[in-house]
């Protein structure tokens, strides 16, 4: 029986090695892609779809306007890339963001550190429906209309009467806002619980 020349055997072994390497590389790339993309897609598959849409600069300015003269701890519910928490920390608030997507939380922590406000800007990987906001007197939410009735109820149960809630782009269904600023998609509504809840209860 004729044996294959040594040179041919070396070439096919090399091809097999390259094939394995390419398959391994492709598998690793797909896994990495899956790990990065899944946290961004998952919010869209939940009962209430709340995707990552960052606040515009005008929206942030409007939120800060509604915080003028306020003190006390602040929370951004679904904090995305941390821009509202970081802007509030720069204004002297002890600000916290709760966010489901770990990549966004890690990125927010990096941004807070880069901007020198990491002492006052903290971020946690958490589901907003499983966190109590009772500790906060300033609450910011950029949500979607489907979640606002349920969130209104949750905040009513948890917040103290001196809390101010600021809703971006979509207002709460029952509360009557005390202040409104901005236009179109940059509109924000501020609700002082002691008056907003009173208005609702008397309605
Ligand atoms: C409309 S974005 C607002 C981001 C940020 N607050 C801003 O104004 O730039 C809503 C954020 O909520 C996050 N999110 C969605 N479902 C959540 C949940 N159940 N718990 C916590 N965060 C959630 C999304 O990943 C997204 O980053």
Image (cartoon, helix red, strand yellow):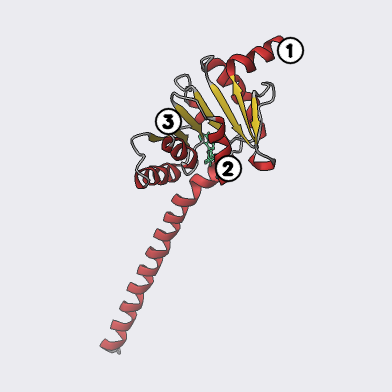
The image quadrant that residue 58 belongs to is: top right
Q: Residue at x 49, y 45 (%)?
A: 39
Query: Which is more foreground, mark 2 or mark 1?
Result: 1
- Whether label 3 lies within 8 Å of ligand 1 gets the answer no
Residue found at the very far front of the displayed protein: 69
Q: Is residue 53 visible?
A: no
* Residue for badge 1: 203
* Residue for badge 2: 51
Whether 34 is drawn above or below 10: the answer is above
Q: Secondary structure at mark 2?
A: loop
Please report whichever mark, 1 or 3, sits nearer to the chain's N-terminal start: 3
Residue 76 at x, y = what percent?
50, 33
How many other residues sit within 10 Å of disc 1, few (<14), some (14-19) or many (≥20)? few
Q: Foreground residue, 184 or 170?
A: 184
- Whether label 2 lies within 8 Å of ligand 1 gets the answer yes
Q: Secondary structure at mark 1?
A: loop
Whether 44 is drawn above or below 146: the answer is below
Asked whether the residues under the numbered discs 1 and 3 touch, taking CB atoms below 8 Å apart as contact, a structural biologist would say no
Query: Which is more foreground, mark 3 or mark 2?
Result: 3
Residue 128 at x, y = what percent?
51, 30
Asked whether the residues under the numbered discs 3 and 2 touch, taking CB atoms below 8 Å apart as contact, a structural biologist would say no
**Numbered mark located on residue 69 in the image:** none
Asked whether the residues under the numbered discs 2 and 1 touch, taking CB atoms below 8 Å apart as contact, a structural biologist would say no
- Compute the Cα span from label 2 to label 1: 33 Å
- Compute the Cα span from label 1 to label 3: 34 Å
Q: Residue at x 51, y 36 (%)?
A: 78
Q: Residue at x 44, y 23 (%)?
A: 72
**Numbered mark located on residue 93 in the image:** 3
């Amino acid at each position: 029986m004729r044996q294959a020349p040594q040179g041919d055997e070396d070439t096919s072994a090399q091809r097999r090695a390259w094939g394995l390497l390419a398959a391994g590389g492709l598998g690793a790339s797909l896994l990495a892609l899956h790990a990065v993309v899944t946290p961004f897609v998952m919010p869209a598959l939940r009962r209430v779809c709340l995707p990552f849409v960052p606040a515009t600069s005008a929206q942030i300015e409007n939120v800060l306007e509604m915080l003028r003269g306020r003190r006390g701890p602040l929370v951004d519910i679904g904090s995305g890339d941390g821009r509202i928490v970081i802007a509030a920390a720069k204004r002297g608030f002890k600000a916290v963001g709760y966010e489901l997507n770990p990549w966004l939380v890690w990125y927010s922590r990096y941004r807070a550190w880069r901007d020198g406000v990491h002492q006052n800007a903290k971020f946690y990987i958490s589901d907003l429906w499983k966190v109590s906001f009772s500790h906060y007197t300033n609450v910011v939410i950029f949500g979607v209309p489907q979640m606002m009735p349920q969130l209104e109820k949750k905040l009513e149960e948890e917040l103290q009467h001196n809390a101010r809630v600021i809703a971006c782009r979509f207002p709460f269904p029952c509360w009557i806002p005390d202040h409104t600023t901005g236009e179109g998609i940059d509109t924000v509504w501020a609700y002082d619980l002691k008056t907003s809840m009173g208005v609702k209860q008397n309605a």
